[in-house]
Image: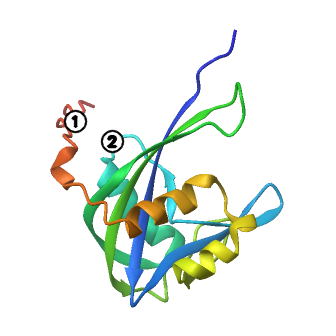
Amino acid sequence: MNSFEPHITVATVVEQEGRLLFVREMKGGQAVLNQPAGHAEFGEDLMQAAYRETLEETAWRVEITDLLGWYIFQPKPGGGVYYRTCFLARPLGHDPHQKLDTGILEAVWLTPEELAARDGEHRSPLVQRCVDDYRSGRRLPLDAIYQHPWPLQRG
């Protein structure tokens, strides 16, 4: 019997002057390309997680503007399942003093064509799929996500 291991993740597609923001990061001893992405933390809503992950991985402050969609990925049978909520954001400014997360080599701006030419470096098939959906014009309203207020913590 396989156990079910869900991973709740977020990603952000950020465009500036025809280029998209990506991270080069280490995975399994290889440098790979991904959108700024990561796991939502306890007590954090998905938009907060997307903002935080983008800042921590790229040093860019962004404004989350739209929801791109939900993506489900299982890298191998019997392994964990990744539930990715992908947002769109516009860049507000770069913080040169922000230290990048461990494992992040650099933030890079690539055109969609440059990304496609480097498909062997994509962390997962979701990297290209999110770009394709973005380029198709998909935009979902942020209020498509309802976040019930967290209960007050009592100490």
Q: Amino acid at mark 1?
A: Trp
Residue under the image location 42 percent in, 64 percent down: 12
User: How many other residues sit within 10 Å of disc 1, few (<14), some (14-19) or many (≥20)?
Assistant: few
Residue under the image location 53 percent in, 77 percent down: 112
Q: Does the residue at mark 2 contact the one at mark 1 (Cβ under 8 Å)?
A: yes
Is 96 left or right of 74, judged from the image as shown?
Answer: left
Q: Which residue is mark 2?
A: 43
Q: Amino acid at mark 2?
A: Gly
* Among the 4 quarters of the image, the one containing residue 87: bottom left
* Residue extending furthest toward the front: 136
Task: Say if 84 sits above or below 74 in the image.
Answer: below
Task: Say if 14 sits above or below 34 in the image.
Answer: below
Of 85 and 101, the residue lying toward us: 85
* Among the 4 quarters of the image, the one containing residue 102: bottom right
Residue 105: x and y in percent read 68, 75
Residue 2: x and y in percent read 68, 15
What colouring method underlies this structural image?
Answer: rainbow
Of 39 and 126, the residue lying toward us: 126
Task: Say if 36 sits above or below 14 in the image.
Answer: above
Residue 5: x and y in percent read 59, 27
Q: How many marks?
A: 2
What secondary structure is found at the residue carrying circle 1?
A: loop
What secondary structure is found at the residue carrying circle 2?
A: loop
Instruction: Report, in whole angstroms, how far the alpha carbon at label 2 lies from the one at label 1.
Output: 7 Å
Q: Earlier along the polypeptide chain: callout 2 or callout 1?
A: 2
Is 123 left or right of 148, judged from the image as shown?
Answer: right
Of 129 and 98, the residue lying toward us: 129
Residue under the image location 18 percent in, 35 percent down: 148
Q: Which residue is mark 1?
A: 150
